[in-house]
Amino acid sequence: MTRQTAHPITHQTLTASNRSAREVARLLAAGDLSPAYQRGSVWTDDQRIGLIRSWLIGMPIPAVIINDRLAPPWPKAVDGFPLGNHLYGVIDGKQRIETAIAWFDGLLPVPASWFPAEQVADTTVTDDGLYVTYQQLTPTGQRLFTNRALLPVIETAVGTIAEEADLYLLVNAAGTQQTEADLANAKLISE
């Protein structure tokens, strides 16, 4: 393997914004969540519920990276839409986006105890007690959650799936995974 390139690296303009998770879910529900380089839906329910908890406590969420396929580098079909008919491709953050879509569509219940009683309109009985979906919150509960659940978005404009995959690799292959021992230690301390 060589790190050499045929040409000097070109600086790429990336646009960062902090958006409502609901806006991102709506925008990307029709996007390409599963380009060929992406892994499947791998988050467990616990991980998805953990993201909702993170939004509730105000925890900063890592940015998702998307490619604007309406931008000039992406090839256009005859009708002017991007080839593949997806306006956006998800480079990184698929699991977070899928979770936001599931939550705002009412498909992901979380413990009702996480919300003040006056914000809960209805509940579902589970083995773990009462749970609530976004749709089971009152209009006030929905509005408060929507206003507090932010998702940073980094938008780029590259012209090919290969360029998207290159960015995916740059973001996802650079870190060192936490070991089971690291996570067990943190869990022990948190209890």
Image (cartoon, rainbow, N blue to C red):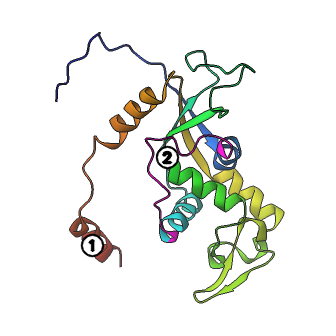
Direction from residue 123 to residue 175 in the image, left or right: left
Label annotation for residue 131: none
> Image point 76% across, 60% down: which residue?
142
Placement of the C terminus among the 4 image quadrants? bottom left
Among the two numbered marks 1 and 2 on one chain, the one whose residue lies closer to the N terminus: 2
Amino acid at pointer 1: Ala
Instruction: For mark 2, give the secondary structure.
Output: loop
> Image point 35% across, 73% down: which residue?
190
Residue that mark 2 sits on: 93
Prevalent SS, magenta region: loop
Rate crowding at label 2 as few (under 14), some (14 to 19) or many (20 or more) other CA atoms within 10 Å: some
Q: Position of residue 27 (x, y in %)?
A: 69, 41
- Residue most extreme to the top: 7
Instruction: Please tell me whether residue 81 is drawn above or below residue 182 in the rendered image.
Output: above
- Residue most extreme to the front: 78
- Residue most extreme to the left: 1
Placement of the N terminus among the 4 image quadrants? top left
Residue that mark 1 sits on: 184
Q: Which sits in the foreground, 148 or 9?
A: 9
Instruction: Please tell me whether residue 78 is drawn above or below residue 67 in the rendered image.
Output: above
Amino acid at pointer 2: Gly
Q: Which sits in the foreground, 1 or 154?
A: 1
| Residue 67 lies in quadrant | top right
* Magenta residue span: 28-45
